Amino acid sequence: MVCASEGGHLAIINSYVEAQILKELFAKYPEHEISARHKNLAHVGFYDWGERGVWSTIHGQSLREAGYESWAKGQPDNATDGEYCGGMFRDALLDDIWCYHTAPFICEKKPESLFHYNYDNN
Ligand SMILES: [Ca+2]
Ligand SMILES: [Ca+2]
């Protein structure tokens, strides 16, 4: 909701290069500056909408179609039966996490949205 209020959306990782950019961004916020429950895991824009282990971006593409599906070792594990939201560790590898666990989050938006935005173009 915060991302949307700023004219963007949770970051969708479309390439290894974009993942590295998010990794660098995350590195600017050390653990001690983060008050959320998770400090080394950020919410990003993918989820398991049907809760059946089929992961897609918030825009409906599969992770492969989006361009990045590098899960961390052993993930997604649905560890506590309820990990239906997408997360990214500090090393840019993906994890499935509880949607309501507080964690840092990363937004993205198009440069032109700095002036105006149109949902039809997103
Ligand atoms: Ca992106
Ligand atoms: Ca997990």
Image (spheres, rainbow, N blue to C red):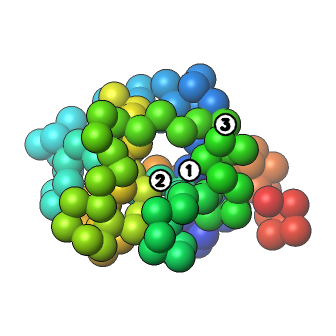
Residue at image coords 59%, 36%: 68
Q: Amino acid at mark 2?
A: Val
Disc on the earlier residue, 3 or 2: 2
* 4 to 76, vertically: above or below: below
Query: How far is the residue under mark 3 from the one under mark 1?
Result: 13 Å
x and y, in percent, of residue 62 in the image: 66, 53
Q: Which residue is mark 1?
A: 11
Would you say 96 lies left or right of 61 here? left
State if disc 2 and disc 1 touch (CB < 8 Å): yes
Mark 3 residue type: Gly
Q: Quadrant of residue 88?
A: top left
Mark 1 secondary-structure assignment: loop
Circle 3/circle 2 CB separation < 8 Å:
no
Q: Residue at x 28, y 40 (%)?
A: 74
Residue 57 placement (x, y as % from top left): 61, 57
Return the mark for residue 64. Answer: none
- The spot of residue 49 in percent (x, y) is 54, 73
Up the image or down, 112 lies above or below 78; here it is above
Task: Confirm or reject: label 2 Cβ below 8 Å from ligand 1.
Answer: no
CB at mark 1 closer than 8 A to ligand 1?
yes
Identify the residue at image location x=34%, y=36%: 72
Rendered image quadrant of residue 121: bottom right
- Front one among 53 and 87: 53
